Amino acid sequence: MRTAIYPGSFDPLTNGHLDVLERAAKLFDRVIVAIARSESKQPQFTLEERLEMMKPAVKRMKNVRADVFDGLLVEYAAKQKAQAIVRGLRAVSDFEFEFQMALMNRKLDEKIETIFMMPREKYTFISSRIVKEIARMGGDVTPFVPPHVKVALTKKLKG
């Protein structure tokens, strides 16, 4: 079984994330969306909230499941018997950081490959950071996130 890990903080999940995930699900027998603790990023949503936002988004994808992890990604990938890590690239500016991470992961475990995937053009400008900023300023995030994520964002910002 060909397994891939799609890691990220997903704070919050965006339509760009889902686009990459849906295409990765066509390439692998099993895809695990691995939500990173990412406390250093000071996430808006807790790890548990991010997992709960991910579950309904992946429910219709039969070969995809959501999980959480802490620690080294390659160690998590090895535990899951994954052959690949899927990373989304929106722009050239993402490439340098992602390339360094891919090389480091290869150094840590050369059996696990990194696959770079670009989202569809209509999603290349979307980032979780920008979505949160739009929501904080009262803007409409409907085109950028699934409906249940919009609800969670609105609730979190009012709460």
Image (cartoon, rainbow, N blue to C red):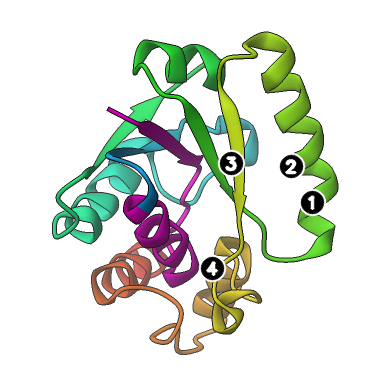
SS type, badge 3: loop
Task: Quickly name the residue at label 3.
Answer: 42
Residue at screen point 27% across, 54% down: 53
- Tag 2's secondary structure? helix
How far apart marks 2 and 4 lie (CA) works out to: 22 Å
Q: Amino acid at mark 4?
A: Lys
Circles 3 and 2: CB atoms closer than 8 Å: no
**In contact (CB < 8 Å): disc 2 and disc 4:** no
Q: CA distance from mark 3 to mark 2?
A: 20 Å
User: Could you tell me if the residues under marks 3 and 4 are in contact, i.e. CB atoms within 8 Å?
Assistant: no
Tell whether position 30 is magenta. no
What residue is disc 2 on?
Answer: 98
Q: Residues within 10 Å of mark 2 (few under 14, many from 20)?
A: some
The residue that mark 4 highlights is 132
User: Is the residue marked by circle 1 packed among few (<14), some (14-19), or many (20+) residues within 10 Å?
Assistant: some
Of mark 3 and mark 2, the one earlier in the sequence is: 3
Q: Nearer the viewer, residue 92 or 2?
A: 2
Residue 122, x across and y down, in percent = 56, 84
The percent coordinates of residue 16 (x first, y second) are 49, 68
Spatial CA distance of label 3 from label 1 is: 23 Å
Q: Amino acid at mark 2?
A: Glu
Pointers 2 and 1 in contact (C-beta within 8 Å): yes
